[in-house]
Each structure stands twice: as structure tokens, then as C-alpha cells.
Image: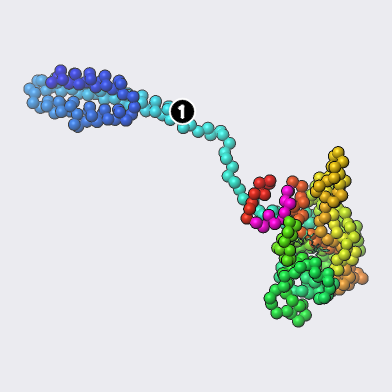
Amino acid sequence: MREKLEQLAEEMTGELAGIKDLGSLESFEVEKLGRKSEFNALLKGLGALSPEERKTVGMRANELKGKIQAALEAKKAELSSAAAGALAETEWIDVTVPGIRPPRGHLHLTSQAIAEITAIFRRIGFTRVRHPEVDWDWYAFESLNMPGDHPARDEWETFFMDAPPDAKLGKMVLTPHTSNGQVREMEKKVLPIRMINISKCYRRQIDVSHVPMFHQFEGLLIDRKVSVTHLKGVLDHFARSFFGPDRVTRLRPFHFRFTEPSFEVDISCGICGGTGRLEGGAKCRLCKEGWLELGGAGMVHPNVLKAGGIDPEEWGGFAFGWGVERTKAMQSGVRIDDIRVLYKSDFRFLRQF
Ligand code: FA5
């Protein structure tokens, strides 16, 4: 029996040396040293030996088993560290590599523009207010010096509400401009006024520069001794702040029923610097002779002041009203040549930002 044990132990030591992976080592342990192994079967036979033989063979058997187990543990440690080394080669992580920034949402461009516009006027003492977006004919037209049958109203291509008219205030409309806020602000009876009214407006229009729902910002200043110079100063402050320090405005004579005199406000073109020509003499393709049209403005008409309960002999003022979307589209670095994209679900144009 002793010889058999010695032979088995020698075989196992040789086999162990040739094992190359942890899986085979595990099978080896079960097969060669487990309950059903040949080695274990021999140990069970020790009881049949004489007491003298049992002692010497038993001791040798334990010694051999201990040696094999020690060799097995050493092999296990060697293979485990080799496996960890191999893993480190194939699956390492460089924690110093910069992360991948997840895509982040942002406010709609119109909301961004509204915030920018509000902040620019707040700096020179204007307060942001809001007036109804569904209002009476009186505030949208009549009080603004536009009687019911006046052709000037046609410009505003208005949506009328299917609602009973008010005996004094007339029909109900979706406000086609923010000028409905003028008389409403005057009715608060707090003078002087410096308001910036930003709201949604609605008109029956749609093309590259018109959407049926858009936003306007309306400035109104009422005080004593107000002149066109003040209006020009405020407009230039806005132009420099919103478009850039080298931009200026130009007032062109125009006609609105609610301002006198009235103007169309232009801004110097950011591409050709107001010259209408590019380097080398070619005509600027963005503007008309150096200027881009922004919106309307003028000195508040005495009839509007009277409709708001203000004495035009003592008080005067100016107003202006521009489209938020079109103004944003003209900001340098923004390339929107069709404002309808702002209200569609195709967001590819946002890649430029
Ligand atoms: C007016 O609405 C006047 N209430 C402006 C005003 C206020 C003049 C105070 C004097 C004093 P107008 O119809 O031109 O004016 O519109 C002003 C601006 O609104 C336009 O220049 C344009 O920027 C914008 N706008 C008008 N209609 C649309 C539309 N359908 N879609 C997008 N923007 C529009």
C-alpha cells in the first residue's frame, strides 16, 4: 500500500506542474484528492493493516497528502495572479481620460431672447410687464386711434374670438400686437411709465418671416419733456447690448395711427458694417444698402394719451414694438433664414449653437 501511495503522490506532483488554468486545477483537486479519489480509497484501507503498519503508513500518507495540498495551494496562487494580470491587460480603465459630456437641453431660443431683452431694458429702468393676449378691440385698435372702419387695421390680419362683443369695448381678439398694453399701462395711473411688455401675438400670416403665433416686445416711456432723442438713445442702447458694441440704429419716416411722428427702425448690418459693400466691392447679400429692418417706433399720439386718461399737454412719450423671433434671428452668430423652424419639431438648425 505504501508503494502505491508513493506512486500516486509522484504522479500527482508531475500532473500538477503541467496545469495551466484555474478550471483544470479545480477538476484536478476534486478528482485526485476528493472523496471518490483513488488516494482517499487507499486511506480508507488503512484500517485493515496491522497496528504497527497502520501507524507508519498512516503517517507517511498524511505527509504526502500535506505536500500535495501545499503544492496545490501554491499553484492556485500562481494561476490566480497570472489571471489577474491578463485581465488588467485586456480590461484596464484609464481614469484620467476626460468624460463624455451627456447632451443637455436648453431654453427655447425665443425664451432665451425674452430673457436677454428683459435684462437689457431693466438696466435702463424699464420694468417687464404682461398684458392680456386675448383682449378687447378697444385696447388692440380703437384706443390706439384706429376706428372700426379704418383701413390701417388691415395690416394686423386679426383673429377674432367667437364671443359676444362688449357694448363699450367691442369684439374680443387674439392680440395682433403688444400695443394693446399701452392704454392698459396708462390706466394703472402710475406716472412716469417705463414698461417693457413682452407677450404672444397672433396674425393670419405664414411665410419665411411670418408665423401665426409670435412674440413682440413693446417699450413705452411716458414722462415730461420726452423727445425723439431719448427714443434714439434707448434704441441704440438696445442695439449695442443685443447685437454688438459697433451697431447703431437708424430711424426712417413711417406711418402708424398711434404714434406721431412714426418711424421704421433699422439696424446697421453686422456683415458689411453698414456700408452695403463687402471687401473687394461686392454687394452685401444680407442687407439692403447697409441696413436691416427691425420694427416700428414713434412718439405716442396725443389721442392715445387721452384714451389712457393722460393729459397730452403735460405728458408725452415714445413707444416701439418689435418681433422677438425676427430680432433673435438677426443676432450675429445666429443663422435662421426661416423663422418657422422655431416652432417645428425638426431641431437640426440648433446644431449651430
Ligand atoms: C406693430 O405691430 C406695431 N404695434 C409696432 C409699434 C409699436 C409701432 C409701438 C410704433 C409704436 P408691425 O406690424 O410692423 O408693427 O410689427 C412689428 C414687428 O413684429 C415686425 O417688425 C416683426 O418683427 C414682428 N412681426 C409682425 N408680424 C409677424 C409675424 N406674423 N411673425 C413674426 N413676426 C412678426
Q: Mark 1 sits on what residue?
A: 89
- Ligand 1, image quadrant it occupies: bottom right
Q: Residue at left 10%, top 27%?
A: 47
Q: Nearer the viewer, residue 349 or 121?
A: 349
Residue 12, by quadrant, is top left
Image coordinates of residue 274 in percent, x first then y, are: 86, 47
Image coordinates of residue 185 in percent, x first then y, are: 79, 68
Quick one: quadrant of the N terminus?
top left
Residue 43 located within the stretch drawn in magenta: no
Image coordinates of residue 331 in percent, x first then y, are: 76, 50
Label 1: few (<14), some or many (≥20) within 10 Å? few
Q: Amino acid at mark 1?
A: Glu
Residue 138, by quadrant, is bottom right
Residue 6, by quadrant, is top left
Residue 343 located within the stretch drawn in magenta: yes
Q: Nearer the viewer, residue 236 or 157?
A: 157
Residues in magenta, as a range: 334-344
